[in-house]
Image: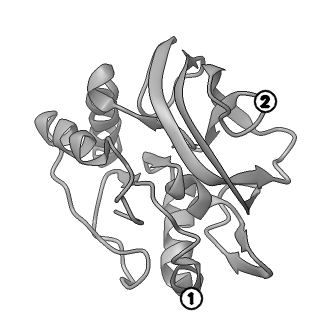
Amino acid sequence: VVLDSSFNFYYYDNLKSLRNNGARLKFFSPMTDKQIPHCDGMYIGGGFPEVLSDSLEKNSTMRNSIKKLSEQNLPIYAECGGLMYLTKSIHSGKKKYKMVGLFDAETIMTGKMKLNYTKGMILSPNVISDKSHVLYGHEFHYSELASISSDAKFAFHLGIGDGIRNHKDGLIQYNTLASYGHLYFDSSDYAKIFVKNCIKQSRR
């Protein structure tokens, strides 16, 4: 699923990596489609959901479906714009748009660009990693998360990069991982592990 990947440097390479590890990809639009194709996992790419907020909000059927699938432990990986989409709302200018509401946080558009290479550690097992190791990626966004739940669980700690809060990134909820950072799947075994988790889901 693509929100708008024109500035996601890794997105298409990551899709290729998923295919190379046995994934069969299906695409759908969170703006216009009412149903999610039958799937064993979901990748919500980055981009600029604030530009599409009105259409994303109006498609409540899709928003509710994605939240329900996450609550049912479907493996979901979301990055940047995908993270924003999974929060409760996006505040842009004087308007507030309802989003999926999976994470207890709100997205605030700041107008200030954050652009960094990122480096840190993956500390918690998640849908794309089953062990602690160094991560490399980048972040590029004009927003920040506010009203983050005090018991929020983060998978990443960054030595370089801002992340979501206090150099932490990679929010975990159920079997969903969402981060501001974009990871290059071929830099580790992310695609292999994500596909493995999708296969486990399909056998339940």
Q: Residue at x 67, y 60 (%)?
A: 87
Mark linked to residue 16: none
Q: Where in the figure is residue 74, as x and y percent of width and height?
A: 44, 51
Report the side of 25 relative to 57 (left or right). left
Q: Residue at x 69, y 79 (%)?
A: 97
Residue wearing tag 1: 58
Q: How many labels does the image show?
A: 2
Residue wearing tag 2: 166
Q: Which amino acid does label 2 sit on?
A: Asn
Residue placed farthest to the front in the image? 112
Relative height, residue 19 to residue 84 (above, below) = above
Relative height, residue 36 to residue 83 (above, below) = below
Q: Which residue is drawn at 58% across and 85% down?
A: 54
Q: What residue type is labelled 1?
A: Lys
Which coloring applies here? one colour
Report the side of 63 relative to 102 (left or right). left
- Of 170 and 92, nearer the camera is 92
Q: Residue at x 85, y 54 (%)?
A: 147
Closer to viewer: mark 1 or mark 2: 2
SS type, badge 1: helix
Q: Where in the figure is residue 121, as x and y percent of width and height?
A: 56, 15
Q: Where in the figure is residue 204, as x and y percent of width and height?
A: 35, 46
The answer for how far apart the CA atoms under marks 1 and 2 are is 33 Å
SS type, badge 2: loop
